[in-house]
Amino acid sequence: MKLRQNPRHWAAKRALTTPGVKSVATYGLVKLHTRIFLGKADEARREERRDHLDDFFAATMDAYVAALDAGFSEAEAREITHAQGNFDFFNHGWTEMMEVPAEELEPHYRRYGEFFSAHGITIDDPLGEFRPAAGIAEAPATPEKLDEGEYANAVAGFADDVYVEDEAGEVSAGGGEEPDDVDVSEVPGVDDGVNAD
């Protein structure tokens, strides 16, 4: 999968692993991700998916921290959560929101199979043990989109590794090193003056 990596991603990592900041950072990051992915959905479908995405992305923040704790890099931990999201989108037939085509779901699962298995995550159950005890909000599926086979926002060809595009537009496998001067106020929601776009 191809991801971006910039100072805000490093700030998010620091914030999500810092007590006292984590809950605020989680809220801001959840709202940011929900807005981004709803922007890819048909306008008529956005509101009916909002609560589901908020709940789902909140759960993946815990998966992200668990992946970091397991020794995965920032980019790998983030890719794990994006894979979880794509599994969920596929299960709902939300193909326009997917970042990878359907045929690349299994290779992404296999690359992180040990982590996924350890936490009960499958393509059919994208949250596994990270599913909240109270569950997550339901949202209508659009299974007919799977038959159409259109993945308008999917980028194919990056299933063999985590690929990171840096601020200069350069794409490389693996991701960069965490800088020393990480500023957690760059995380959406941590500082009200920060633009989440």
Image: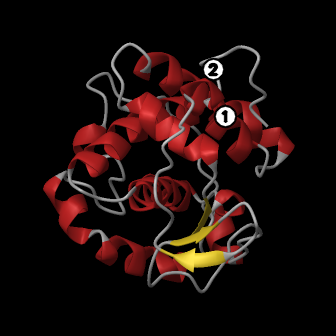
Where disc 2 sits, the SS reads loop
100 vs 181, nearest the viewer? 181
User: Viewed as shown, does residue 41 lie left or right of 164?
Assistant: right
Q: Which residue is mark 1?
A: 32
Give the answer, above or below, for where 11 lies relative to 146.
above
Q: Residues within 10 Å of mark 1 (few under 14, many from 20)?
A: some
Residue at the image point whose x is 48% and y is 30% from the top: 55
Q: Nearer the viewer, mark 2 or mark 1?
A: 2
Residue at the image point whose x is 59% and y is 60% from the top: 93
Where disc 1 sits, the SS reads helix
Looking at the rendered structure, the kind of residue marked 2 is Gly
Residue situated furthest left in the rendering: 118
68 vs 176, nearest the viewer? 176
Give the x, y percent position of residue 52.
Answer: 54, 33
Task: Decide if residue 1 is in sight here.
Answer: no
Give the x, y percent position of residue 1.
Answer: 54, 72
Give the answer, above or below, for where 109 lies relative to 28.
below
Residue 19's disc is none
Q: Which residue is mark 2?
A: 189
User: Viewed as shown, does residue 78 lie left or right of 114?
Assistant: right
Task: Decide if residue 155 is in sight here.
Answer: yes
Q: Quadrant of the C terminus?
A: top right
What scheme was used to colour the molecule? secondary structure
Give the answer, above or below, for where 182 lies relative to 77.
above
Looking at the rendered structure, the kind of residue marked 1 is Leu
